[in-house]
Image (spheres, grey):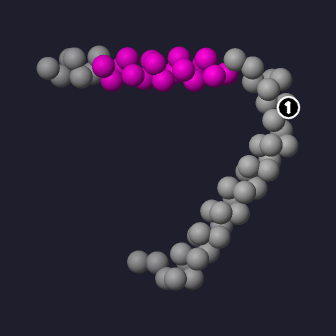
């Protein structure tokens, strides 16, 4: 399906992309703490809402 060169390129690209993203996140960590304070609760609320929808869907199926 893929040649060995394509797989090698994909692996190198993925590893380098992850490393660059880690360095960029560490560089902006102070800014993230200042501007995105409390965003964890929004994520928790979103996950709870999606879970609630799945629960309703499974109850309606029966």
Q: Is residue 8 left or right of residue 26?
A: left
At 57% from the left and 23% from the top, the residue drawn is 43
Which residue is farthest left? 62
Locate the N terminus and report the quarter of the image it occupies: bottom left
* Magenta span includes 50: yes
Q: Quadrant of residue 28?
A: top right
Q: Is residue 8 left or right of residue 55?
A: right
Q: How many marks?
A: 1
- Residue 34 coordinates in the image, percent (x, y): 83, 23
At 18% from the left and 22% from the top, the residue drawn is 61
User: 32 or 57, which is in the foreground?
Assistant: 32
- Residue 29 coordinates in the image, percent (x, y): 81, 35
At 14% from the left and 20% from the top, the residue drawn is 62
At 61% from the left and 17% from the top, the residue drawn is 41
Q: Is residue 53 left or right of residue 9?
A: left
Examine the residues drawn in magenta and state their main secondary structure.
helix
Q: Quadrant of residue 59?
A: top left
Q: Quadrant of residue 5?
A: bottom right
- Residue 53 coordinates in the image, percent (x, y): 36, 20
On screen, residue 21 above or below 28: below
Residue underneath mark 1: 30
Q: Secondary structure at mark 1?
A: helix
- Magenta extent: 39-55
- Residue 14 coordinates in the image, percent (x, y): 63, 62
Q: Is residue 34 left or right of residue 60?
A: right
User: 35 or 30, which is in the foreground?
Assistant: 30
Local crowd at mark 1 within 10 Å, few (<14), some, or many (≥20)?
few
* Magenta span includes 2: no
User: 3 or 21, which is in the foreground?
Assistant: 21
């Amino acid at each position: 399906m893929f040649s060995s060169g394509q797989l090698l390129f994909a692996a190198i690209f993925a590893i380098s992309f992850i490393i660059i993203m880690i360095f960029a996140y560490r560089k902006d960590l102070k800014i993230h703490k200042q501007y995105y304070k409390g965003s964890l609760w929004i994520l928790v609320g979103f996950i709870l809402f999606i879970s609630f929808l799945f629960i309703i869907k499974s109850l309606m199926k029966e």
